[in-house]
């Protein structure tokens, strides 16, 4: 089973009030040196079957039509490597 991640972020020209609120709060909490914060969404999709070009094209279509509002948001589709499972004895 493969994992595909779709990261959705507001376009740079779109105002991000939540990101601005976080950025203003950071110095009050002792976190200095952060000049900008943008918030977004992350979708992790577990894909059954082979992860070929057709599957990735379908996921891209899904992101473009359902997961992101492409008028105000950009998105990136990434395939995540399978995580190694640590077995303790």
Image (spheres, rainbow, N blue to C red):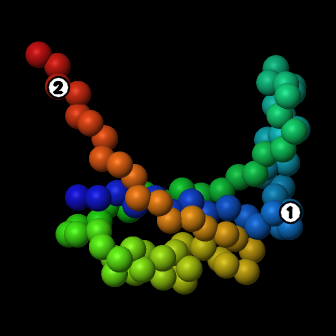
* Residue occupying image coordinates x 23% and y 34%: 85
Mark 1 or mark 2, whichever is nearer to me: 2
Q: Which residue is at the front of the view, 73 or 20?
A: 73
The residue beneath circle 1 is 15
Quarter occupied by the N terminus: bottom left
Residue 51 in sight from this viewpoint: yes
On the rendered structure, is 56 left or right of 2? right
* Residue occupying image coordinates x 83% and y 67%: 14
Looking at the rendered structure, the secondary structure element under dot 1 is loop
Distance from label 1 to label 2 (Cα)? 46 Å
Crowding at dot 2, Cα within 10 Å, few <14 / some 14-19 / many 20+, comes out as: few
Quarter occupied by the C terminus: top left
**Mark closer to the chain start, 1 or 2:** 1
On the rendered structure, is 32 left or right of 6? right
**Image position, residue 79 (x, y; %):** 41, 58
The answer to whether residue 65 is above or below residue 38 is below
Name the residue furthest front.
53
Crowding at dot 1, Cα within 10 Å, few <14 / some 14-19 / many 20+, comes out as: few
Looking at the rendered structure, the secondary structure element under dot 2 is loop
The answer to whether residue 16 is above or below residue 86 is below
Name the residue furthest top.
89
The answer to whether residue 56 is above or below residue 6 is below
* Residue occupying image coordinates x 73% and y 80%: 71
The residue beneath circle 2 is 87
């Amino acid at each position: 089973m493969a994992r595909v991640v779709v990261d959705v972020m507001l376009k740079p020209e779109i105002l991000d009030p939540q990101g601005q609120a976080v950025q203003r709060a950071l110095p009050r909490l002792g976190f200095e040196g952060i000049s900008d914060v943008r918030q977004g969404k992350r979708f992790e999709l577990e894909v059954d079957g082979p992860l070929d070009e057709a599957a990735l094209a379908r996921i891209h279509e899904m992101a473009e039509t359902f997961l992101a509002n492409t008028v105000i948001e950009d998105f990136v589709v990434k395939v995540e490597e399978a995580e190694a499972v640590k077995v303790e004895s």
